[in-house]
Amino acid sequence: MVIFPAIDLRRGRCVRLRQGDPAAETVFGADPAAMARHWADCGAAWLHVVNLDGALGDQGPDALNLRRLAEIRAAVTLPIQFGGGLRTLDDVQQALALGATRVVLGTAVVQQPELAAAALQRFGAEAIVAGLDARAGRVATHGWQAVSDLHVHDLGRTLRQAGVLRAVYTDIARDGMLSGVDADGTAELARQTGLHVIASGGVRDLADIQRLQALEAHGVEGAIVGQAIYTGTLDLRAALVVTRNA
């Protein structure tokens, strides 16, 4: 199972939000490239980078967080999973050109289902990840500020039929809360859709990682860890040892 340290970017800084609330922000550093080097030195095999300004629709003309992506790419050799505010094929192309290994499409695939198929055709299935973010099972969009009537399982099945291979699943109510990961919900999404699913939101400690790892056979492919590694409730090195020695 792959553990993805998260680097969430807002106005160029490393931050964490609670439940996606822009007003509930904690800043953990002003140098994302240095943070990327730190997680690489801990032994991470991937990074998960999010452009929160893009997701929230206030990226601005200078696209500072995209420059930060390029700086992270220059700082580390790790593959990067990148999302936030990618709405068009040109957005995807730009993110890949700046150093992303694969991109996460969330709001775009809800509002433009045809975009997923076009992105798969142009960039390949390994470069595209669906972002399935939900409140009480319903898909949320626009940086989690809007909730649709679409159930996350239904969207997942549609995307899998279109050729998407993997998804990041976030239980928004748990995100940034250290309340424990929704391991069962993650596995159920994988079973219902046939997607390989990366869990996000609520990871608190090593026990959460072990719960997810026990569900690998059910389609749980990885876990994104943020608040836990920034506040110290999860030691990234210890988690990596557990997953690699299983």
Image (spheres, rainbow, N blue to C red):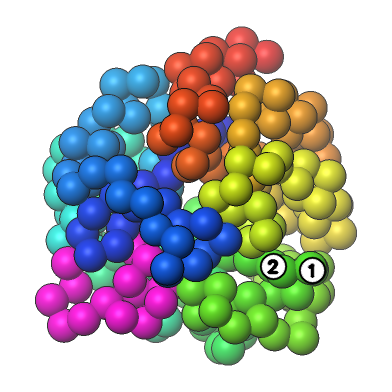
Q: Give the range drawn in magenta.
A: 49-64
> Closer to the camera, 218 or 14?
14
**Which residue is label 2 attached to?**
134
Q: Crowding at label 1, few (<14), some or many (≥20) Cα neighbours within 10 Å?
A: some
Tell how many labels. 2
The correct choice, above or below, for 109 with respect to 7 in the image is: below
Q: Is residue 164 visible?
A: no
Quadrant assignment for the C terminus: top right
Residue shown at 16% from the left, 83% from the top: 61
Q: Residue 46 in the image: x percent, y percent?
A: 42, 37
Which labelled disc corresponds to residue 178? none
Q: Residue at x 79, y 68 (%)?
A: 137
Which secondary structure lies at badge 2?
strand
Provide residue 179's location: percent of width, then percent of height: 68, 43
As for residue 181 lying within the magenta part, the answer is no
* Viewer-proximal residue among 97 and 3: 3
Q: Residue 137 carries which label?
A: 1
**Cβ atoms at labels 2 and 1 below 8 Å apart:** yes
Residue sitting nearer the eye, 135 or 216: 135
Q: Is mark 1 on a helix, strand or loop?
A: loop
